[in-house]
Amino acid sequence: MKKNILAVIILAATLVNLTLSAVMLFVYMPNAQKMNTLITKICQVLDMELESPLPVEKENVVAATDLEPIIVGEEMLIKLSASSDGKVHYITVTASVVLNTKAEDYKTIQPLMESQQEHIKEIIQASIRDLSYDNYETDRDLVKQEILQNLQQEFDTECIYRIDFGTYFAS
């Protein structure tokens, strides 16, 4: 009989322990989820602040021997948007499109670059025209990235590797 009473006491203690564990689970779980959400949001904000506003470096680096520059505009004279001093400013740019010769569609894109030079000049001029004399130096890399994306979308290719401004003179 003593063995049965001891077994009943152990069973009762186990049931009480199980019940209290279930109550703790339902009491603490919503708070833990809220805390996890809060920590995730804080980490996302910190990651956003750590990211640079400059264009991200390309993951796939192409060897210099696999690049072919094509000059599309020699000394293009472009009027810049109004600056803080109220004067009209112009920029003279020599631009070239650099193609990746190892790209799958290189043989179809390369002839297009030469036949579509005027259209490419328009895309380059439209992007540069949005700049002002005050912020050209700081935003030049962003404009090059924008031109690159516009050309890649226009010709539907990844063969266009980068845009280079050989010489430029802002006045």
Image (tube, rainbow, N blue to C red):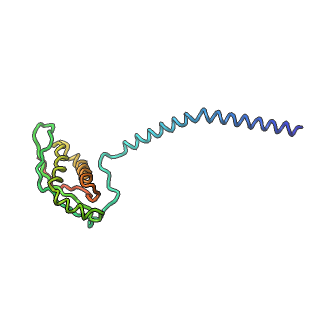
Left or right of 68? Residue 38 is: right
Q: Residue 99 falls in which quadrant of the image?
A: bottom left
Which residue is at 26% across, 54% downward? 152
Q: In this view, does 107 lie above or below 171?
A: below
Q: Give the quarter of the image for residue 53.
A: top left
Q: Could you say where residue 14 lies in the image, as x and y percent from the top left? A: 74, 38
Q: Where does the image place residue 116, in percent across and percent down from the top left?
A: 17, 56
Image vertical order of residue 36 relative to residue 164, above or below: above
Above-or-below relation of 126 to 64:
above
Nearer to us in this view, 144 or 105: 105
Picture quarter containing residue 136? top left
Residue at the far front: name it: 108
Q: Nearer the viewer, residue 109 or 18?
A: 109
Give me the residue at 65% from left, 35% from top.
22
Q: In this view, does 17 lie to the left or right of 132?
A: right
Name the residue: 82% across, 39% down. Answer: 7
Give the percent coordinates (x, y) of residue 41: 44, 38
